[in-house]
Amino acid sequence: MSTGGEQRYVELFRLSKAYPNPYGDRVTVVDGFNLIMKRGEVVSLIGHSGCGKSTVLTMVAGLNSISEGSVVLSGKEVTSAGPDRAVVFQSPCLLPWMTAIQNVRLGVDRVFAHGTRQQRKEICEYYLDAVGLADSMDKYPRELSGGMQQRVGIARAIALKPKMLLLDEPFGRLDSLTRMELQDVILKILDREKITTMLVTHDVDEAIYMADRICMMTTGPMARVGQILDMPFERPRRREEVLEDPLYYDLRGCLVSFLEEQDRRKHRPAPVPKIAESDAAKSADASDQADALAHAEA
Amino acid sequence: MKYKIIRLLDVAGMNCFEPVVRLCYGEEPRQQVRKIGLFIVAPVVVFALFIGAWAAIAPFIKTKAGSLPSPVDVAGSLVDVYEFHWREYAKKADFARTGDDRDTTLALVTQQLADATERKAVVEAELAELTATLDAETAATLKKYEEAIENQTLVYHASQFEREQELHKLGDKLEVSQDEPREQYVASVREHQTLSARESTHLKELRSDLAAIRKSTTPQFAALLREKNDLDQETQFLDKRASLLSDGNRRSNVASAALTLKNADAALAAAAPGQRYDATLDYLGAEERVLSSAGAIYAKPPTFFDQVFTSIECVFVGFLFATAIAIPIGVLCGLNKVIMASLSPLISLFKPVSPIVWLPIVFIVVGGFIERPDEAWVKPAFLSSAITVALCSLWPTLVNTALGVASIDKDHLNVARVLRLSMWDRLTKIVIPSALPLIFTGLRISLGVGWMVLIAAELLSSSPGLGKFVWDMFNNGSSDTFSQMLLTVFVVGVVGLLLDRIMIVFQRLVSFDGGATAL
């Protein structure tokens, strides 16, 4: 693969999502979202709940139809869901009638159909071991705690050897201790496997600790990329080092002030009329794109 | 161990016994006793009340076939039915017995027969004695009563005759042209008619009272009569067994047929030129007889328990048809909105149709396919009952399957989409497992409906089974058969209950809430 392909491994170009509301008008949730990701990069989407970050992620996953614009992954346009883009949702969504290993196996059988039974079994065991579930492979989801279920979900996603990993608030339902544990589990795997990752979250600390770049989204409707921040920390990361870094609080402050600003804007009455907005959107698009490119090249 | 038993009870749907287990292990006795009172004692008490009320009311409901059978009668009919069953099977076994087995059984039966005959003689003697002593008393009462009725009849006849004469005279004197006297005359004739009618009803009542008195005998007499009756039946039964073990046995039938064959052969060998053709015919006939008697089995009438078994068999055949049709269609409906929308009018149309309507139609159609009912490997009546059951019981499964498939968790479908599972994998690994609990709920309802429908279908189509049993008993119309019909009610109920329980167990085993791992 060329360096250009490595640099522009994932491209989200003017991605938009609009739903018709019951009165015939279209409500645009995401409008002109541009982002370019390098291969092996971890980008975090952050924004207020309901701002459309999950919509962007499900469009990339192919689970949600794209109204306008396109997603290109490794030179191919995304049209439907597929195992090259593994998703971990907020709820583990394991199949309750299968054991942990059977849940992982379902995907592995599909992706490594050419391997022998033994090979496929070993792949499943390797990834379940990697998420720390070596002892609970034959348990049913109801016998596992929420954190352990989410570990199975992560193993299931990574075992597919995806080109891209999509994490949709994967720790949203977990207590903070389990959350930290799982953050480390994922970071360890990502450091080893170098999977291009999109992480949707609304937790500022999580975003700073896990991501290489943080993409802040404006509050919807018509959400778009507001600002992109580079994280200056080296990989592999250690939590204490990141927390003790003098830049940490500056970055955090920057993110929080952006979010607060969005929050204030949201409560401002009388939105700008539509025609004027679309003009403004055009110019904003251009600058966004330039911005995204600049970061990708940096 | 304790929890294992409790889990087993839970899976079997018999949670009501849980407090008993807990009590045995001494866990919070007070609470367990309270629960036992609630879940076991209270239902038992209510059932006892029901039986009591039934026993109290039954004698007052008079019918042509005697009064409504009491619980005791129904319990007695269970014994009768069982005895009939046992006896028929004994006869069947006797017919096929051979060698030493046959000899020892014959000796035993002969012994029993001698005993029974002896006892019967004793009972008959007692009965004769009792009749003699009773006769003197009852004859006097009866005579008095008869005379009274006779007198009453004469009185009524006389008065009727008198009134008629009077009316005739009045009629002669009547001035027919005037309205008022004419109307008066009509009124008095009408009065005469009603009076006569009332008198004849009274006479009828008196006569039926007399009949009741004739019938009513002392309890001792009735008991003896019943005993004699039983012994009659028993000796008859033993007699039949003895004959089946000796002359009527299959082996002796074959032996005698073989002898005839030998004779026919000899006759053919010695036949004069003109008789050879006829002798050969005789020989062939004898040969045929040897073969048929060797293959013969005892022609046993179906007993009550045979009927129960046939009914269960039939309901399962129908239920299998229903399942085989309903689940695939239900899955298709659940998967595809177009199919669902296009099939739903048909489903709504046929769902409420009663089995009574389906049966004759199915009967004709099945009859059309099976031209020779006697030679067919499946009886048309059985098949049409089963198909009727299927037609009526497939709807709950269909609707529930469609619902189960349509309401699959979106997340689970997303998993299928991300993995790009093939249609087959999607069905077997995601759709069916997640719809299974609802499918089984539907199957459970279907089986219940099927069982109810089956009894009606059998009753109408005279296909062997419990329904036919009830119909036969209805046509018999004696008080014994009346109590056997009531017995059928309970047996149908119990079998239905058991079928439901079985389905509950299956339902728990397939649901993924932890039921399966309880075992």
Image (cartoon, rainbow, N blue to C red):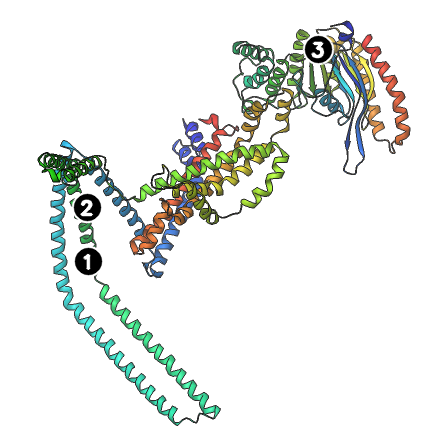
Residue occupied by mark 2: B237
Q: How crowded is mark 2: few (under 14 residues within 10 Å), some or many (20 or more)?
A: some
Q: Nearer the viewer, mark 1 or mark 2?
A: 2
Residue A145's place in the image compared with B234, above or below, is: above
Label 2 is placed on what type of residue? Phe
Residue that badge 3 annotates: A239
Q: In this view, does B400 lie to the left or right of B496?
A: right
What is the number of the mark on residue B220? Answer: 1
Front-lying residue, B476 or B495: B476
| Marks 1 and 2, the one that precedes in the sequence | 1
Q: In which quarter of the image is residue B366?
A: top left
- Is there any visible trace of residue A33 in the rendered image? yes
How far apart are labels 2 and 3 at the CA level? 95 Å
Viewer-closest of A245 and A233: A233
> For this view, does B45 lie left or right of residue B408?
left
Dots 1, 3 in contact, CB < 8 A: no
Q: Residues within 10 Å of mark 1 (few under 14, many from 20)?
A: few
Amino acid carrying mark 3 in the image: Arg
